[in-house]
Image (cartoon, grey):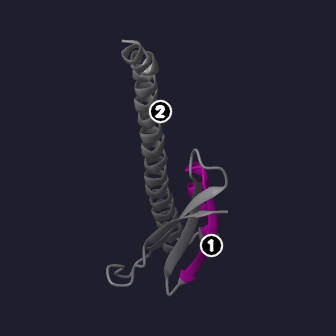
Amino acid sequence: MKRERVHEISQRGSGSILALMVVVSALVTLSATMLVSSIVLARAEARAAADTGAVAAAWSVRFGGSAPCESARAVVARYGGEMVDCHREDGDVRVTADIPVPGIPSALTRAVALAGPRDCGAASEKSSSVSAA
């Protein structure tokens, strides 16, 4: 009889530990999901910033603007990013933009876009990546 009682006492509180483990694993899963979501959203934002900046610069070139890269820089800045590179290639404009990833200090996502009067279907080299700065 005494032996059964010792076994009963040792199981006391195990339900609380199990519940705590379930809550901790749910929080870890939620945190990982939020991290991945913020990377995906930052990549989309970087692509949009680079694309829109490249189009703004191409329009500036098309209509005789004197500073197409300044137009692109202003557009990328409105997205909360920084234009890393902007240059003309045979009438087209290539813009590279960095956008910070929310929730990850010093992490940036980069996108490159090309816009201009020629057919960009085959010549486009859109890309994006995430890196820590």
Residue farthest toward the front in the current orientation of the protein: 1
Give the residue type that dot 1 points to: Asp
User: Which one is nearer the viewer's eye here, 28 or 93?
Assistant: 28
Q: Is residue 94 above or below residue 74?
A: below
At label 2, counting other C-alpha atoms closer than 10 Å, the crowd grade (few under 14, some 14-19, many 20 or more) is: few
> Considering depth in this image, is 11 or 87 the residue closer to the camera?
11
Quadrant position of residue 3: top left
Quadrant of residue 19 within the rendered picture: top left
Percent x, y of residue 48:
45, 57
| Nearer to me, 94 or 69 | 94
| Residue 125 part of the magenta segment | no
Quadrant of the frame with the N terminus: top left
In this rendering, the answer to whether 82 lies above or below 32 is below
On the picture, is 72 further left or further right than 47? right
Up-down relation of residue 112 to residue 105 (above or below): below
Residue marked by disc 2: 24
**Count of all numbered marks drawn on residues in the image:** 2
Q: Distance of mark 2 from mark 1, alpha carbons? A: 44 Å
Report the quarter where the C terminus lies: bottom right
What residue sits right under mark 1 in the picture? 85
- Identified at 45% across, 16% down, the residue is 9
Upstream in the sequence, badge 2 or badge 1? 2
Q: Which residues make up the magenta segment?
A: 69-88
